[in-house]
Image (tube, rainbow, N blue to C red):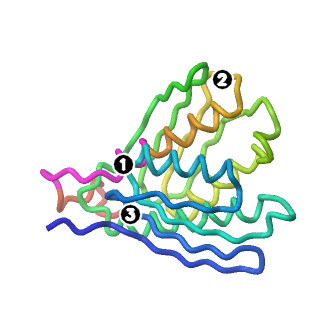
């Protein structure tokens, strides 16, 4: 019988109150961040990753979206680290070159135990609707720090900020899906010659 790999995080600060549950092996997406565009992006992430994601965030969005976005990244990264467990049997690496109309995004992940973000995604506009596009980098920084993964995200082509953001989150979901997938033939093997990830 397959054990579902899940991570649950409750994170409360003076700025945000977050309840999050991530299942790497499927489920529904129920997302309410208080920011409609981020809800849309995280729904795409869950759908393309094949992940179950339940997320509720109450934050100081009357100030702006910074604290909520960063803290959601932190909580999601922590939930991923908890869900991935001892890392035995995982693919470890995942990558995707994703087209979204005129946009082309490269995303590559290594569940390495080392936190690193290489981010090269220039947005042509400062906002998509009411959402500040600068905040996407803060989300991914928070994620990699807690998930303890290496993540490279590069914009290779693109003119529309909405398409760029969609491409990033779809590619992110699919790259993580590959990296987290279990290889049944090597289910008890840690994918590292060092014996530690």
Q: What element carries label 3?
A: strand
Image spot of residue 180 (x, y percent): 34, 53
Q: Nearer the viewer, mark 1 or mark 3?
A: 3
Q: Residue furthest right?
A: 63
Residue found at x 71% / y 79%? 13
Report, in whole angstroms, how far the alpha carbon at label 1 lies from the one at label 2.
26 Å
Q: Is residue 49 left or right of residue 191?
A: right
Q: Nearer the viewer, mark 1 or mark 2?
A: 2
In the rendered image, residue 44 lying in the magenta stretch gets the answer no
Q: Name the residue under label 1.
A: 179
Depth check, front residue: 166 or 30: 30
Instruction: Tell me the tag on residue 23.
Output: 3
Residue found at x 43% / y 43%? 48
Q: Are marks 1 and 3 in contact (CB under 8 Å)?
A: no
- First in sequence, mark 1 or 2: give its number: 2
- First in sequence, mark 1 or 3: give its number: 3
Instruction: State which region is magenta.
Output: 174-186
Q: What element carries label 2?
A: loop
Image spot of residue 165 (x, y percent): 63, 38
In the rendered image, residue 177 lying in the magenta stretch gets the answer yes
Tell me the quarter of the picture where residue 196 sits: bottom left
Depth check, front residue: 73 or 101: 101
Q: Nearer the viewer, mark 2 or mark 3?
A: 3
Tell me the quarter of the picture where residue 190 sits: bottom left
Q: What element carries label 1?
A: helix
Residue found at x 73% / y 33%? 122
Instruction: Tell me the tag on residue 158.
Output: 2
Report, in whole angstroms, how far the alpha carbon at label 1 lies from the one at label 3.
14 Å
């Amino acid at each position: 019988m397959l054990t579902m790999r899940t991570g649950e995080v409750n994170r409360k600060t003076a700025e945000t109150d977050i309840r999050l549950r991530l299942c790497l092996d499927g489920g529904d997406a129920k997302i309410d961040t208080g920011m409609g565009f981020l809800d849309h992006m995280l729904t795409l992430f869950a759908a393309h990753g094949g992940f179950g994601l339940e997320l509720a965030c109450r934050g100081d969005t009357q100030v702006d979206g910074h604290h909520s976005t960063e803290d959601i990244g932190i909580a999601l990264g922590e939930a991923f680290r908890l869900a991935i467990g001892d890392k035995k049997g995982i693919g470890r690496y995942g990558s995707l070159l994703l087209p979204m109309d005129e946009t082309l995004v490269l995303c590559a992940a290594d569940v390495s135990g080392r936190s690193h973000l290489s981010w090269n995604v220039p947005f042509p506009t400062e906002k998509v609707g009411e959402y500040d596009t600068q905040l996407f980098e803060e989300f991914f920084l928070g994620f990699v720090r807690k998930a303890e993964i290496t993540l490279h995200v590069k914009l290779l082509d693109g003119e529309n900020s909405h398409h760029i953001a969609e491409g990033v989150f779809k590619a992110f979901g699919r790259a993580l899906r590959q990296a987290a997938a279990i290889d049944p033939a090597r289910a008890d093997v840690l994918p590292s010659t060092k014996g530690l990830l």
